[in-house]
Amino acid sequence: MKKLLAFISMVGFLACEPPQTEKQAEEKEEQYPFLFEPLVKDMYTADPSAHVFQGKIYIYPSHDIDSGIP
């Protein structure tokens, strides 16, 4: 569990740290590509929450229904 919390903290820290230069941003994206890709790419998903079961992280988004109202 401690390793999981350390990993989540590291990801959060790296994601929030603004890059200094364009070159540093490119290097960070090459080193940590998972930080720059969305976890859920489907439409009508919202408000994800993470749950840990038996050492695995599961992300459960809610859903928005297209009501046709602009």
Image (spheres, helix red, strand yellow):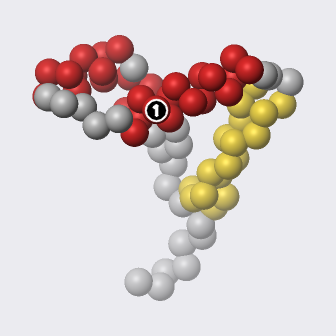
Provide residue 28's location: percent of width, then percent of height: 30, 21
Provide residue 49's location: percent of width, then percent of height: 67, 49
Considering the image in quadrants, where does the C terminus appear?
A: bottom left
Q: Amino acid at mark 1?
A: Phe
Along the line of sight, the residue nearer the viewer: 51 or 3? 3
Left or right placement of residue 4 versus residue 24 in this view? right
Judged from this view, the residue extending furthest toward the left is 22
Residue drawn 44% across the image and 26% down it? 34
Judge the density around disc 1: few (<14), some (14-19), many (≥20) Cα neighbours within 10 Å. few
Provide residue 48's location: percent of width, then percent of height: 62, 51
- The answer to whether residue 39 is seen in the rendering is yes
- The answer to whether residue 37 is seen in the rendering is no
Residue behind mark 1: 13
Residue drawn 60% across the image and 58% down it? 47
Left or right placement of residue 49 versus residue 1 in this view? left
Disc 1 secondary structure class: helix
Location of residue 65 by image quarter: bottom right
Location of residue 29 by image quarter: top left
Residue drawn 24% across the image and 17% down it? 27
Left or right placement of residue 46 versus residue 20 in this view? right
Please determine whether, in this image, residue 35 is positioned above or below residue 62. Answer: above
Considering the image in quadrants, where does the N terminus appear?
A: top right
Judged from this view, the residue extending furthest toward the right is 54
Provide residue 41's location: percent of width, then percent of height: 48, 44
Please determine whether, in this image, residue 47 is positioned above or below residue 12. Answer: below
Along the line of sight, the residue nearer the viewer: 42 or 49? 49
Tag count: 1
Residue drawn 78% across the image and 33% down it? 52
